Amino acid sequence: MSTTETRPAKTSRPPLGVRLNYYSAQNVPLLLSIGILVAMIFIYLILFALRQHRLPGSFELSTTLNNSMSVGLAALGQSMVVLTGGIDLSVGGIIDVTNSVAARMMQNNPGSMLEVTLVVLLIGAGAGFINGIFVTYGRLQPIIVTLATLAIWQGVALLVLPQPGGSIPDIYSNLLSGNISALANLPSSLVIFILLILLWQVLRRTRFLVTLFAIGNDERAARANGAPVQLAKVGAYTVGGLFSGAAGLYLAAVATSGDATTGTQFTLTSIAAVVLGGMSLFGGRGSAVGSLIGACILTLLLNVLFFAGVNPQLQEFFQGLFLILAVIISTLIRRLLQRAR
Amino acid sequence: MSTERSTLRARLPQLTHNQRGTVFAYIAVIVLFIIGGIYRPGFLGLDNIGQLLLLASFVGIVAAGQTFVILIGGIDLSVPWVLNAMAVLLTTASLGRDSRAWWVIPLVLLIGAAIGSVNGMGIVFFDIPPVVMTLGMNGIMQGLVLGLTGGFTCSTCNSVAPPVTQNAVTGQYLFGLPNGLFVWIVIAVIVGLILSFTTLGRRVYALGNNAVAAYLSGINVRAVTIIMYSLGGLFAAVAGIALTAFGQQATLGMGDPFLFDSIAAVVIGGTSILGGRGNYWGTIAGAIFLVVLRAVLQQYNISEAGRSIATGVVILVALLLYGREAREV
């Protein structure tokens, strides 16, 4: 990329136009996914207005965001692993376990809520940690390690919660999926989304995330430069598991009950969200903000299909087609841009 | 651990890493059969072994396609619903009549291969990562099956598989063993021969080991990739036909277990998930191993949850034994 050569020294900050130009050249996939999101929102608004003769209100906003949140959290976890060039198929299994544990253990008192939240997040992180250990110190391929742990966690979840059930206190559920009255009745999922984006903006500047980007781009070079590759990779899987655990917890909070098989679909949707968000599955490129956007795109797509009156049984067909077409279009645009430069 | 390893290495000196995996897998299968036999001697009866091997043949056939795809460094996640779609196509198009089977079966196989080739084309012409392409294809096929059959409420959905296919799978002509087993043996020999003794097979290994080197040495990388993915679709279709014939009818979600099983069978059999190393003989052992493991666990009254955990643990152990990569410098 020629833009990197013209990058000026740190001391003299270039004018805004140059910086924007540089930013957009570096973030084509992310900007593309934002473009898709805007287009989806637009189509959704039109269809909604045509069907309901009004514009969607705060209820629609909060349900859409609530539905996106679980996928978004899972996709965030997936992003960590995908950044290193790996893939985490156990996301669904971790969600199964954490979802079951949360629904089974949580009592209606603050102490229990806090305790179970911590336990569930710890379980998620622990599951990710195990993946990370097998991948780095076991020197095994991520895709197959996580396929095996997926089966293990699915089994564990069934042991924890053989029948769908359990319960989540209403207060807890409202806290995570209701509206916050202190903040002008904004949906709490919107606040969580914003916090997650801010968290990522901080995280990606840390030594840990920079190491992950380095590993994804060239693991050998990262090692040769003295980066703690194995440690960072274990960290990536652990943080990934933590986010998957959070997704399972959030899912339980929204449904106010648990289901040991609810996570199955999330392995695939989290990958789809990461891809739609413009992250490269080969590692080292992309932003977790994109993954959150990808999750929203997937949810909006379902809403659009619904309001377009598409046979719900054809849902998967359009989702699959959309995923493939989105990747093809972004590939073509990238090729076009490369030729133009 | 280290002493045990060195003795094994001394005993199997001329075997490569992956061939050792294949040998391990076959030894594990025999051990499993013995464990099953200790609990219930009938487990080792020809009848029971025949039935278990027949069940393994379905996994083995899907895994044949998966072996081809994984050998070139890809992966096929579209297996479950391609299999399911082809099974539904078989019953709804043939209406359970032998008189239609002669054109329906080739049609099903052809469409299966065509779907696989679309996977391959997306991957080579648009640089779509195999995971994404086959994942999307899986969704597309799932939606098509559900949508076109109206959630499996169509009038022809309850048709059975043509008797000729049922005969080919569950009939018994030789030694009281199901015919499906011999179909699998024929497929195994063909796949083994393709991989070991044809130009295409050499190209598969070359491509899997180093795509750039394969391209530079004049191999049509795109064509080989497309052929491998279409074989993946073809074998999913074959398994769809066999499974429908076995259960007489097609059902929704009948392909779901085969994604995990086909990949696991390939890996347990010693084939590298990175491609370029491995063979179908190992995959066969992997498929038998998975099916027999579940049967043994079921005999010991272990629940579905326990079986799932055990399968996962076994895969991890197998990987640690022979799936590790070389230490990087």
Image: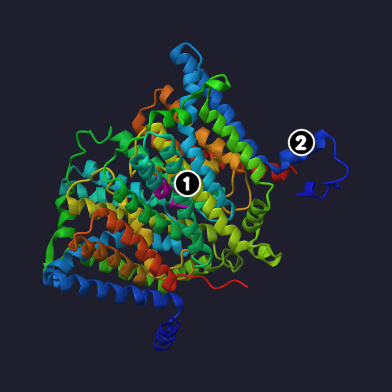
From where the camera sits, is residue A308 visible?
Answer: no
On screen, B169 above or below A18?
below
Q: Residue furthest right?
A: A12
Q: Quadrant of the C terminus of chain B?
A: bottom right
Residue A70, percent across and down? 46, 37
Magenta span dominant secondary structure: helix
Residue B231, percent across and down? 39, 58
On screen, B199 above or below B122?
below
For the residue carrying disc 2, how many other residues have a C-alpha within 10 Å: few (<14), some (14-19), or many (20+)? few
Q: CA distance from mark 1 to mark 2?
A: 38 Å
Q: Mark 2 — residue?
A: A20
A92 falls in the magenta region: yes
The quarter of the displayed image where residue A312 is located: top left
Give the camera-side residue of B74 and A67. Answer: A67
For the residue carrying disc 1, how many other residues have a C-alpha within 10 Å: few (<14), some (14-19), or many (20+)? many
Query: Residue drawn 46% across and 40% down?
Result: A114
Image check: B22 left or right of B249? right
Mark 1 or 2, which is nearer the eye?
A: 1
Please give the chain letter of the residue carrying mark 1: A
Marks 1/2 in contact by CB < 8 Å: the verdict is: no
Task: Tell me where the magenta segment starts and ends, as one range.
Answer: A88-95
Query: Residue drawn 47% across and 14% down?
Result: A50
On screen, B183 above or below B84?
below
The quarter of the displayed image where residue B286 is located: bottom left
Query: Residue drawn 25% across and 46% down?
Result: B90
| Number of the label disc, if any, that sits on residue A121 | 1
The amino acid type of the residue labelled 1 equals Leu
Residue A102, percent across and down? 38, 42
| Number of the label disc, if any, that sits on residue B204 | none
From where the camera sits, is residue B29 visible?
Answer: yes
The amino acid type of the residue labelled 2 equals Leu
